[in-house]
Image: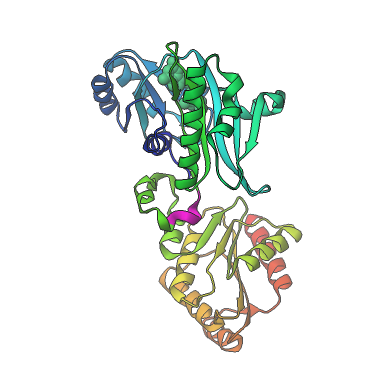
Amino acid sequence: MNLHEYQGKELFARFGIPVLPGQVAATPEEARSIAASIGGLVVIKAQVQAGGRGKAGGVKLAHTPDEAFEKARDILALTIKGLPVRKVLVAQAADIAKEYYLSIVMDREKKAPLIMFSAEGGVDIEEVAHTAPEKIIKQHIPLEGLRPYLARSVVAKAFPDAKQTQQATQILLALYRAFTEGDCSLAEINPLAVTPDGRVLALDAKVVLDDNAEFRHRDWDHWRDPAEETSGERLAREKGLSYVKLDGDIGCVVNGAGLAMATMDLIKHHGGDPANFLDIGGSSNPEKVTAALRIITGDGNVRAILFNIFGGITRCDDVANGIVTALRESPFSVPLVIRLTGTNEVKAREILAANGLSATTSMDEAVQMVIARAQEVTA
Ligand code: GDP
Ligand code: MN
C-alpha cells in the first residue's frame, strides 16, 4: 500500500522525525481555516500518489488564509499524472537553505535495506541517478541493524557543521526505525531540508508499506484510501482474492499463483495480452468464483475471459457451479473460454454442458481460443 504524503509524515512523526505541523483538507474552505489556525506562510500540497507534484503545479505557497483558499481551489481542480486531486495538505511552510535526499528501500537482490542519500535533493532522484550517479551515497544496512556510527558515516560529509550532521544522523536512525517497525518497503524524504537557521526537516514523505505485514498493523486500515482503490481491487480484498490489474484485454481467472504466471506467459507467447492476474486460490468456494467474474467483467478493457483451473484441492465441479451461478446472477456478453482439469472434471463438464457451456482440458488450446475470441470482439 502506498501512503499519501500526510500519512507518511504521520508515520515519520511517530518515530521522531521532525515534520512541520499540517492538516489535510478536501475543500478550499477547509484549507483556509487550517491556514488560519497554523498562521503565517503555509504550503498547499496535492495529495496524490505521484512524484513531481511540484513541477505539475501541485505545490504552492500561500501567505494568507485567503490565498490558501485560492491555491487550494486551483490545486483541487488539477489532475496530476492521471490522478485527480481530492485532498490537499496544508502545512506550515519552511524557509529552505538547502535540499537533500534520504531514503531507505528494501533491496531484494541483496536481501537487505539500502540507504540512499544525496546532497542533490529536492529534484527527481532518478535524474540524479542517471546523470550523476556518484552523487548518491548507497549503504546497505547489515543484519544487526543500523548503528549510529554507520548512520553518521552516510551523512557526515554533506552537512556544513556538527549540529546539522547530528540532526541528520538522528533522522536517519529514526527513519530506519520507521522503516523496520513500520514494515515499509520504501521510506523516502525528498527534500530533507535545512532551514537558514540550521534546522533539518522532512518536507516530503513517500512511504510504501509491505502488504504482507498488514496482519500486525491494525492501524493501517485508517490509512487505506478507498478513493485510490478501484471497485475491483476492493472486492478482491474483501473476498480474499489476489488481483492485479494489467493493461491487456484477456481476463484471467486461475487457481494458484504459479498457474497464473504460467497462464500469462502462455497468453503472451501466443500473442495475446492479459488484462489481469486473478488467483481464486486453492479453495473451492463458488462465492469466490462469482466475485472473480464480477471483478473481471467490471474491467472495461476485457474482451474475453479465460478460466484456467487445475483441480487439486480445488474441485472442478465447485468452480463449474460458481461459473453457472455467476452467469445466472449477472449475465454478461464477454466470451468465456473454460479450461478445467483434475478433481471432479467429468462432473464439472456435465454441469457446464447442462447450462450450455463447454470446457477444454488443454491449456494451450484454451489460450489460443481465448485470444481468437478477443480478436473477434475487437475486429
Ligand atoms: P514533489 O514534487 O511531489 O516531490 O513534492 P515536494 O513535497 O517534494 O515539493 C516540491 C518542492 O516544493 C520541494 O522540493 C520544495 O522546493 C518546495 N517545497 C515543498 N515544501 C516547501 C516548504 O515548506 N517551503 C518552501 N519554501 N518550499 C517548499
Ligand atoms: Mn518530493
Task: Give the x, y percent position of residue 197.
Answer: 42, 11
Q: Residue at x 51, y 18 (%)?
A: 162
> Foreground: 154 or 203?
154
Pick the quarter of the image with the C terminus: bottom right
Magenta region, mostly helix, strand or loop? helix
* Residue 120, quarter of picture: top right
Residue 120 visible (yes or no): no
Q: Residue at x 55, y 22 (%)?
A: 100
Residue 52 visible (yes or no): yes
Depicted 353 relative to depicted 377: above or below: below
Depicted 85 relative to depicted 339: above or below: above
Colour mode?
A: rainbow
Q: Residue at x 43, y 73 (%)?
A: 287
Side (left or right) of 367 relative to 115 = right
Task: Give the x, y percent position of residue 123.
Answer: 57, 22
The region drawn magenta spans: 210-214
Side (left or right) of 197 relative to 120 = left
Depicted 109 relative to depicted 71: above or below: below
> Foreground: 120 or 231?
120
Q: Is residue 369 magenta?
A: no
Work out which residue is located at the far top of the displayed protein and give it: 196
Task: Give the x, y percent position of residue 113.
Answer: 59, 43
Q: Residue at x 38, y 29 (%)?
A: 76
Side (left or right) of 366 relative to 181 = right
Task: Give the x, y percent position of residue 157.
Answer: 61, 20
* Residue 203, quarter of picture: top left
Tally of numbered tags? 0
